[in-house]
Image (spheres, coloured by chain):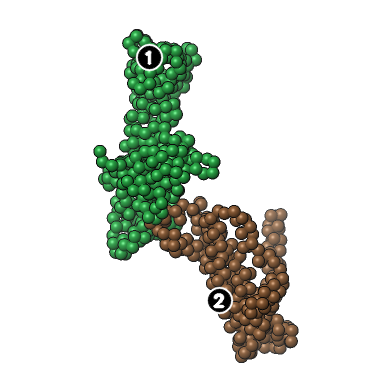
């Protein structure tokens, strides 16, 4: 296997007594789109800033192609950042902003201009070249910030919450545009975001952080289907999390006796769960079907509809079982239109045992 | 007439009276500087430029004007440079005793100028600067630097700290960032500071009176003339000094207005 491009090796960052980042290690391959995700204060931005050299690790090492990077000043690194606030130079025109990095590299004026024109063209802001940045909309500023960073033709691009300041409709457009740019350029993208939908939509791999530590690293699908712990299962959303008492069955599967009754799921491959131990089962909400009657196979829980929440083209149905357990199921708007559900209506929530998984104890 | 209209009228009248009170002496100075009569009394004795001719013919006044221009010219450059540096240190760094540093930097204009003048005279007498133009410049720099610092600080308060880091991130060294980002961003404030400190120095009388010795600046010369005689030439000098000062102040104000206008647009 080829050597990783960037290695974050046991990196920590202390601010006084507070550890913003505590012992974080992961590697990034060339051309990957990595998302650093977590709630605010989880250390994702600090990690990004340490890669850019804007913050110094208290301990640990950051390597680029095997070479220690810690002591390199920010201006000696080739890791342009797209700032959350865009941080465009307010006294310069769009063109001068895009040329700024090239000027620092002492590129001759004609070449500078040519490159800046190319990148402005590519990002659809060629018509704004002579404007001042205070005359631009949020979406346009974002493009200037991208053009300014990409004009350096770096081997990695850092993005700090690139979409958070945009309107929702622009956000979705910019999201697919970032994915397209990443594919076309083939360079490494490292993107910080607090939104799991952004991270999962764009990244090849997602690093989930909380309180300065990595909770899970994996492809979006993997994380969605196999959360490593309770924090991840809760943070990515759309999961049912049941806590109860385990009981190992004759066929090796595990029954969980909990608030929603007795439900089954396969035993986890790693650590064994023993009868009588507390265990946590995760069942993704989109894997739960709602039926009118019981069929007698798989996991079935009788429940009553409490609320129906419309989120875009999906609908989340909140249910309550007779024992007082809570459950949620996700349906498409289409399904919802075909078989409408009324609040208070009794339903049977059903899922195959293989759709659920136990969290490591 | 309604109450609101009456209140409006009274307010206008009051404002007019306040302005008249402030500007009447200045206006009368300018008006009588063109008066042909020797004494500033009505009726006007006719239009004349004789007092202007007289002051331009007077070598001591010429000398004073030239001294004032040299002192103001050098002072504004040094004071603005120091003020900018002090404001940048405040913007960029956090350190122990920063509030003390800021208080000290802002202190000179709060010290009564008489005390500042005496102190400067004593000190400069020891180091051999008293009675020289550099001696006056030192005093004026001390007095006007805080104004320059205040103007630049105001401007830097509008500079997103990420912008400086963004320049580093794009490969600009700290020096390249200073001249490529910080100074251009502060340019309106720096220009305003140059005009304002020049105006402060050009008008300053007390420090100059203490330390100038034989190298009188224009305000010192004017006082010396007033002590000897009341001449309409004073009016002519007053008009010129007022013209220079008001030009500098208005230039500074225009730059500041443009600056705050832009900041307001950015927030809006």
Near-viewer residue (B13 or A12): A12
Marking on residue B73 = 2
Instruction: Determine crowd level at label 2: few under 14, some 14-19, many 20+ residues with C-alpha closer than 10 A.
Output: some
The colour chain B appears in is: brown
Secondary structure beneath disc 1?
Answer: strand
Which quadrant of the view contains residue A126?
bottom left
Q: Is residue A45 visible?
A: no
Quadrant for the N terminus of chain A in the image: top left
- Residue A75 image point, x, y percent: 39, 55
Which quadrant of the view contains residue B113?
bottom right
Output the letter for the chain in green: A
At 45% from the left and 48% from the top, the residue drawn is A55
User: Quick check: A343 above or below B117?
Assistant: above
User: Quick check: A348 above or below B158?
Assistant: above
Let me know if marks 1 and 2 both belong to one chain.
Answer: no
Q: Is residue A2 shown left or right of residue A339? A: left
At 62% from the left and 69% from the top, the residue drawn is B142
Q: Is residue B98 visible?
A: yes
Distance from the alpha carbon under mark 1 to that under mark 2 = 88 Å
- Residue A223 image point, x, y percent: 36, 30
């Amino acid at each position: 296997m080829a050597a990783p491009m960037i290695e974050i090796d046991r990196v920590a960052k202390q601010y006084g007594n507070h550890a913003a980042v505590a012992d974080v290690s992961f590697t990034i391959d060339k051309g990957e789109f990595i998302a650093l995700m977590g709630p605010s204060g989880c250390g994702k931005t600090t990690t990004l800033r340490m890669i850019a050299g804007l913050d110094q690790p208290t301990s640990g090492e950051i390597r680029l192609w095997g070479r220690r990077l810690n002591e390199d000043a920010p201006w000696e690194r080739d890791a342009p950042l797209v700032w959350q606030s865009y941080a465009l130079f307010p006294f310069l025109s769009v063109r001068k902003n895009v040329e700024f990095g090239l000027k620092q590299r002492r590129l001759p004026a004609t070449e500078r201009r040519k490159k800046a024109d190319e990148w402005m063209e590519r990002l659809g802001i060629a018509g704004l070249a002579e404007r001042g940045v205070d005359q631009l909309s949020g979406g346009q500023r974002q493009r200037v910030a991208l053009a300014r960073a990409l004009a350096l033709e770096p081997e990695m691009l850092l993005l700090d919450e690139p979409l958070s300041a945009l309107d929702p409709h622009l956000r979705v457009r910019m999201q697919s545009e970032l994915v397209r740019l990443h594919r076309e350029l083939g360079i490494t993208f490292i993107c910080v975001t607090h939104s799991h939908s952004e991270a999962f939509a764009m990244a090849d791999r997602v690093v989930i952080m909380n309180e300065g530590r990595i909770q899970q690293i994996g492809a979006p699908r993997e994380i969605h289907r196999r959360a490593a712990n309770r924090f991840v299962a809760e943070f990515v959303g759309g999961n049912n999390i049941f806590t109860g008492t385990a009981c190992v069955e004759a066929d090796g599967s595990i029954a969980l006796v909990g608030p929603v009754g007795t439900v089954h799921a396969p035993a986890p491959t790693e650590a064994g769960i023993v009868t009588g131990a507390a265990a946590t089962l995760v069942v993704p909400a989109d894997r739960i079907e709602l039926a009118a009657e019981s069929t007698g196979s798989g996991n079935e829980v009788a429940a009553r509809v409490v609320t129906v929440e419309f989120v875009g083209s999906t609908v989340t149905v909140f249910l309550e079982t007779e024992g007082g357990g809570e459950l949620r199921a996700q349906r498409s708007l289409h399904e919802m239109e075909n078989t409408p559900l009324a609040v208070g209506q009794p339903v049977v929530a059903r899922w195959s045992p293989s759709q659920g998984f136990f969290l490591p104890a | 007439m309604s109450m609101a209209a009456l209140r409006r009228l009274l307010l206008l009248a009051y404002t007019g009276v306040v302005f008249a009170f402030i500007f009447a002496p200045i206006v009368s100075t300018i008006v009588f500087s063109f008066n042909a009569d020797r004494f500033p009394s009505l009726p006007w004795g006719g239009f004349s430029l004789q007092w202007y001719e007289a002051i331009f013919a007077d070598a001591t006044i010429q000398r004073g004007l030239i001294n004032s221009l040299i002192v103001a010219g050098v002072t504004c450059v040094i004071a603005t440079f120091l003020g900018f540096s002090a404001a940048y240190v405040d913007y960029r760094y956090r350190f122990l005793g920063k509030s003390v540093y800021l208080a000290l930097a802002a202190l000179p204009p709060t010290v009564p100028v008489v005390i500042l003048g005496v102190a400067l005279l004593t000190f400069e007498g020891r180091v051999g600067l008293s009675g020289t133009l550099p001696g006056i410049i030192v005093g004026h720099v001390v007095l006007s630097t805080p104004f320059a610092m205040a103007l630049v600080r105001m401007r830097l308060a509008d500079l997103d700290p990420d912008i400086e880091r963004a320049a580093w991130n794009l490969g600009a060294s700290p020096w390249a960032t200073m001249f490529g980002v910080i100074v251009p961003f502060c340019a309106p404030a720096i220009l305003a500071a140059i005009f304002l400190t020049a105006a402060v120095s050009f008008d300053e009388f007390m420090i100059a009176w203490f330390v100038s010795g034989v190298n009188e600046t224009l305000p010192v010369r004017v006082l010396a003339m007033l002590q000897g005689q009341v001449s309409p030439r004073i009016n002519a000098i007053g008009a010129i000094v007022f013209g220079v000062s008001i030009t500098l102040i208005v230039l500074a104000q225009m730059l500041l207005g443009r600056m705050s206008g832009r900041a307001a647009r950015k927030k809006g």
